[in-house]
Image (tube, rainbow, N blue to C red):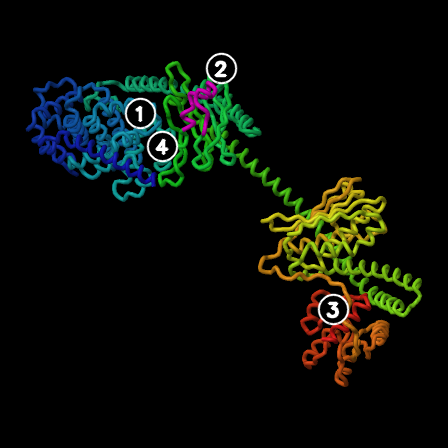
Amino acid sequence: MRMKQRKALHSTENSAKVREVLKKLESLPAPPAVAARVLEWITQTDPSITDLCQIITSDPSLSLKVLKLANAKVHGIQFGDMKIERAAAMLGTATLRQVLLGIIIRDTLIRDRKHDDPYLVQIWLHSLACALATQIVAEKIAPKLADMSFSCGLVHDCGKLALLCALPTEYEHLLDGAPLSGQPLHAMEAAAFGLDHAEAGKWLTQAWNLPKLFVDSAWLHHQPESVLADMDEHGGLLTLLALGNILAHEVLAEPLDPAAVERRKYLLDKTHLSFHQIEKLKEQVGKRLAERRELFSLDEEDAVATFCGALQRAGILLTHMNIELTAKRNEGERTGRLLQAVADAGQGLARAYNTAEIFTLACAALRESFDVTTGCIYALDAENQRLNGLAWDAGTEAHFDWPLEADTGTPLPPPRENTPAPVQPFYDLVLNHRERIPSPDDPLFTGFTPAFARPFRTLPLALDCTFLGEMLLGAQTAEGQPAGLTAAHSEIHGLGQLCGMAAAALERLGTSAQLEARAERLGAAMRRMQQINQKLIQAERLAAVGQLAAGAAHEINNPLAIIYARLQILGLKETNESQRTAFRQMEEQIGRISSILTQLMDFARPTQPQFATVNFNALLENSLSMMSGNFEKRGVKVLVELQPDLPLVWGDAKLLEQVFVNLFINAEHAMENAAGALRVRTVWNSGMGHVNVDVEDTGSGIAPEHIESIFDPFFTTKEGKGTGLGLSTSYSIVKSHQGDIRVTSTLGKGTLFRVSLPVAPAQQAAAVRLPQKGAGPKRSGGDILVVDDEVRIQELLTEALEMHGYKVVACGNGEEAKELLKKRTFNLMLLDIRMPVRSGLWLLSEIRRAALKMPVIVLTGLATPEERDQALELGAIRCFQKPFKVDELLEAVDATLKK
């Protein structure tokens, strides 16, 4: 958008210039009546000499000039002795055309300029030389065009005369600078006036009603070769004119711009003229120019004088060109030194590892190569909200680091008087840098550009339309001239290169910091992934171990249940107290085996908690009573501190009891070598969302290297005294209750476990369900169906039930049980879940479908929690885990049948 606005503004300015020039051209005098008649005669195809003589005789001034020209051609004849008719005959029709055209142009346009005006002579001499060169080339390759070619050459630069008369001062200045500019004159004219001499010539020839050939000669002689080649009319003659114009410049030792040199090659190829032919043609131009000078009111010179004059002009031009080339060479050498200095600085900037080093390298380059004795360079650190930089003067350097306001990004520096001396001159500039940053959202935004903030020059450090900082260059001369304000193009270019390199170095550091941070995050993520992978591998191993453990537990459970139940029955029958004691010891050891198997099963397939409100104090007292015998044997003193107003806890009482029994067992093992103390304490503060339970012992403690591993499955330091599953299982149960368990320990002094569990929701605070002890209902008779695939368990259950007055029928699978149920009615069924042929769940479904009103108690050794839940949903009233206590089973049977 900005570019369009600039183009529109440029077009408006050019239009104003053109209108002004045209207004001045219109003020030029028109040809007098006699001149108009002469121009009409000149343009006729076959003009009459008699008519011309009558026209000339009517104007004494014109008659005098014709007679003078004729006398110049034939010396010795006095004016009074010659008639106009004779003079016309002596000059000839062709010469009269040429001479009269020159007289009309000169007398009409430049009547107010002196005869020897150097600008007039320069233009007129070139016009004559061009006319002669065009005529000579035409004589060589197109003789029919020779006569008209001279006139075309003579009139081709009439636009220059028009501009010289309309804009004398401006055009003279332009002509003075053109030879050394290296640019085409018509391009300089268009830039200065909005139109060039070709367009001015077109306007003049049309105003004078000259033929179209003359209009095209004045207008199109600088057009590209492709334009001339496409012209159907006058194209050939204009091509000759273009070549004649170039040869005239060479004859008069006038410099050719690069475009004209290329055009010369094209025109020579088109006209098939060789180098030697061109050189001979140029010799002829020089000779004829010496012969025709006087005819066209130019001082008389022979060919040698003309050539010498051209050489003199060439010498002056070469001197000026040499001076200019020397200046350019010096400028080039200066540019080379600056660029080398910038390149050297760039190598250091590419290796810089922090912003301070970038600032130091840039400062050194500015001081040593650009003579900047006072300056400042700073950068914005958006990520850390800092502005840091370096300022210097003639003798010292000072780094500064200011915070940026988080919302606006405005610097927050200390007071000016508290900043180092080199920083103080740039204090306000750095503080107000945001005023110089254009918004990229601005439709006119084109990037960041150098600016002046007197007495400083500000150069932005920007990359890809991102503002990174600034260079502020201070006074470098005695007059206080800002650095770069009058600097050469090379210095400005060098400063731009240095800014770009510094900006790239800052961007590289920022990108490097981002990559480093990203690499650190990636490394941390990879470490976490490695830990997760290790945990997954461990989990897979544990899952495999769990599967093996579950299978082993099932295979062990059934025979163990038979042994356990048989031992209990023997104990009931035995009357000898010593034998009964031995039976009880055996039962305890089998109970220990059963507990280990239960832990393995729970680890392999954790039981889902059945949440309800739990009285934590009562649960802890119950758990301690279960361990009291063990503590008494080891002489462990138990200290209980239970807070009386403890709120109810939300959890599974059975699972939580398992947690604390495990912790008590762990404390017992820690104090096995010496009598110690166990402290159990509950803590709750009003407003707390959880209850804390501390289990603290004065045992051997845990080594620091083992603290992180104590909750890992199968980890144990008591070889042969534990499975390593107790604490792991406890940890899983606490976590499943949305709680937390932590441990602190001092080796040789003791260990503290702290368990935190959430308080029960207020609306669910109700009666607490706790394991109750006491005698069961009195047993009574009834018909019971035992369904188990293990024959020994069938026998064992049959014997125990029959001993207590029940009638028992046993079978080995669900299909057999279904057939029995079709034949007779039973008061109760004891059912195993996993059996061959038909499972217990299938049988429960069939019973439900048949709507039998028979209670079912499930006995299982390997059923999953889901299978047990399904059994309860299908109508089972209770589940017993193998191995089971016979008296508890009998109590459940009696209680069920009593209901």
From what the image shows, is residue 50 above or below residue 301?
A: below
Point out the stretch of residues depicted in magenta: 412-431
Q: Is residue 801 left or right of residue 467?
A: right
Q: Residues within 10 Å of mark 4 (few under 14, many from 20)?
A: few
The foreground one among 659 and 392 is 659
Query: Can you tell which of label 3 and label 2 is closer to the viewer?
Result: 3
Q: Is residue 846 left or right of residue 133?
A: right
Image quadrant occupied by the N terminus: top left
Residue at the disc numbered 4: 259
From what the image shows, is residue 808 above or below residue 333?
A: below
C-alpha gap between disc 4 and disc 3: 108 Å
Residue at the disc numbered 2: 395
From what the image shows, is residue 478 above or below residue 516?
A: above
Query: Can you tell which of label 4 and label 3 is closer to the viewer?
Result: 3
Position of residue 132 measured from the top left corner of the image (x, y, whole percent): 26, 28
Disc 1 residue type (three-letter):
Ala
Query: Residue at 77% across / 84% down in the picture?
Result: 824
The quarter of the displayed image where residue 732 is located? bottom right
Helix, strand or loop under label 3: strand
From what the image shows, is residue 852 above or below residue 405?
A: below
Image quadrant occupied by the C terminus: bottom right
